[in-house]
């Protein structure tokens, strides 16, 4: 039987289909362009190749083409009766993920990886910061992902892709020394891996190495295709370095070049998250508001993500509503999230509705109201998925509210509670607290 890159059996008799599938999966895992085209070549060689349909579904969903993704996964499901046990389990797992059934999907994940630990595409769905475990609504999920990757590591050896994912998980769990060694190993083995660059950026952020991150990302992005899915997001990481350094002109150039809606290479969730985070964080640092940019994000959010879904994306939709003072949309979304939570269909529960009201108060300059809403939520950020770097936006907003109300002792306590070594705090007035 033909096998994939990780020596797993594939139900196809076509060598051409297998080769195209291996190429497509490699591109999908490293976030390089061309994965969809390669999956299509695999299907042209063997239309009945179930896992090629499933792989295509994952890429389409990431790009925000939800209907096409569902059709591709449906095609895989229709072929599942004629595949191996591993492939059938792979497809069934994705079916649960696509349906938003996070708890059954988590159970299926652990059973699947116990039997087939080298199924890298399943690992990719589960173990990135905004993947299945990250978006599960559970507290402690940073450590859960790191523990899963530790358990899987013996099955992958020095595989550059796995090592980059492992490094990222360890950095999010605070294990920076080990994470640093792993990410350096990964990018040295194969620098053409956007997850390697992403992990490197995060480890530098968590270690407070702004200049190292800036030089690395500027060099790496110069050779990464503009249409690569992570071009916009890695440009956002680079913009954080510039905001922290006070280089507003360069930060704004990066925004217009790669983060703005008409320039970002990612799907709708990534476009809204990176764009709104850049604009909000730049204002926290004291830079002027770009009302036109906020208006465009608000309109795009209303059309592209009209209802709640991903907690991390919803956080940034909330920011757009708050910035535009659209309290009707903000309250409607909060109530939708509460209704979904009551039905057990919104993993972060009441956390985001409470957060929404805190951001609305902040935008009205009701800083005491913002503190009253946001302070009790401290320590729960990971419930929405995403990285610690992304969660800092929430903590920085609370810090700015404390500074605006001269609650300096509370502000100092927030800074003292910040995780050791993490990047600077580009919030207007924070420097005076030291």
Image: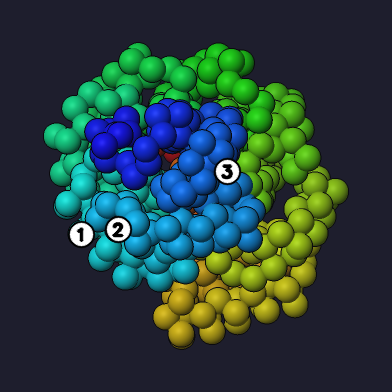
User: Badges 1 and 2: C-beta atoms under 8 Å apart?
Assistant: yes
Judged left or right of residue 96, residue 27 is right
Q: Which residue is mark 3?
A: 427
Q: Position of residue 110 (x, y in %)?
A: 22, 57
**Which quarter of the image is occupied by the N terminus?**
top left
Q: Position of residue 83 (x, y in %)?
A: 32, 53
Q: Quadrant of the rendered structure where residue 385 is?
A: bottom left
Q: Position of residue 224 (x, y in %)?
A: 58, 21
Numbered circles on residues, count:
3
Q: If you read the primary sequence from the N terminus, does the residue marked by circle 3 or circle 2 appear first?
A: 2
Is residue 307 visible in this depiction of the protein? yes
Residue furthest right in the image: 292
Question: Going 58% across and 30% down the picture, which residue do you hit?
Answer: 33
Q: Nearer the viewer, mark 3 or mark 1?
A: 1
Q: Mark 3 to mark 1: distance in Å?
A: 45 Å
- Mark 1 lies on residue: 111
The Cα atoms of the two marked residues, 1 and 2, are separated by 9 Å
Q: Earlier in the sequence, mark 3 or mark 1?
A: 1
Left or right of 40 on screen, residue 412: left
Q: What residue is shown at x 51% (from left), y 80% (from top)?
A: 340
Please tell me the numbered disc located at residue 89. 2
Q: Is residue 190 above or below residue 4?
A: above
Observer-nearest of 184 and 127: 127
The vertical placement of 314 against 146, above or below, is below
Question: Do the numbered discs 3 and 1 sit on residues whose CB atoms are within 8 Å?
Answer: no
Q: Secondary structure at mark 2?
A: helix
């Amino acid at each position: 039987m033909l096998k994939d890159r990780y020596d797993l059996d594939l139900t196809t008799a076509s060598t051409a289909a297998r080769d195209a599938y291996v190429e497509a999966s490699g591109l999908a895992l490293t976030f390089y362009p061309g994965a969809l085209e390669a999956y299509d070549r695999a299907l042209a060689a063997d239309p009945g190749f179930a896992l090629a349909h499933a792989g295509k579904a994952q890429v389409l969903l990431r790009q925000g083409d939800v209907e096409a993704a569902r059709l591709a996964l449906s095609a895989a499901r229709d072929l599942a009766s004629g595949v191996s046990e591993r492939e059938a389990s792979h497809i069934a797992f994705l079916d649960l993920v696509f349906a938003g059934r996070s708890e059954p999907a988590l159970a299926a994940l652990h059973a699947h990886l116990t039997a087939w630990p080298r199924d890298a595409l399943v690992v990719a769905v589960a173990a990135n910061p905004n993947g299945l475990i990250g978006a599960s609504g559970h507290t402690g999920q940073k450590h859960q992902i790191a523990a899963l990757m530790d358990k899987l590591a013996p099955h992958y050896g020095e595989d550059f892709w796995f090592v980059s994912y492992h490094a990222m998980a360890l950095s999010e769990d605070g294990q920076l020394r080990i994470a640093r060694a792993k990410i350096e190993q990964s990018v040295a083995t194969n620098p053409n891996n956007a997850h390697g660059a992403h992990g490197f950026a995060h480890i530098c952020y968590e270690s407070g190495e702004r200049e190292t991150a800036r030089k690395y990302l500027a060099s790496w992005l110069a050779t990464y295709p503009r249409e690569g899915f992570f071009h916009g997001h890695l440009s956002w990481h680079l913009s954080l370095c510039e905001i922290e350094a006070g280089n507003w002109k360069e930060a704004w150039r990066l925004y217009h070049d790669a983060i703005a809606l008409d320039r970002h290479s990612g799907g709708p969730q990534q476009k809204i998250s990176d764009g709104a985070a850049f604009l909000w964080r730049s204002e926290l640092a004291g830079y002027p508001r770009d009302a036109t940019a906020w208006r465009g994000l608000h309109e795009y959010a209303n059309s592209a993500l009209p209802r709640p879904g991903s907690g991390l994306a919803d956080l940034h939709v909330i920011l757009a509503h708050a910035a535009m003072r659209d309290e009707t949309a903000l309250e409607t979304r909060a109530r939708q999230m509460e209704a979904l939570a009551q039905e057990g269909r919104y993993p972060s529960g009441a956390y985001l509705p409470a957060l929404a009201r805190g951001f609305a108060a902040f935008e009205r300059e009701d800083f005491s109201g913002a503190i009253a809403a946001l302070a009790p939520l401290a320590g729960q950020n990971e419930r929405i998925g995403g990285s610690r770097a992304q969660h800092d936006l929430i903590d920085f907003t609370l810090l700015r509210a404390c500074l605006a109300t001269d609650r300096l002792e509370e502000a100092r306590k927030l800074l003292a509670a910040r995780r050791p070594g993490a990047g600077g705090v580009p919030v207007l007035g924070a420097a005076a607290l030291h």
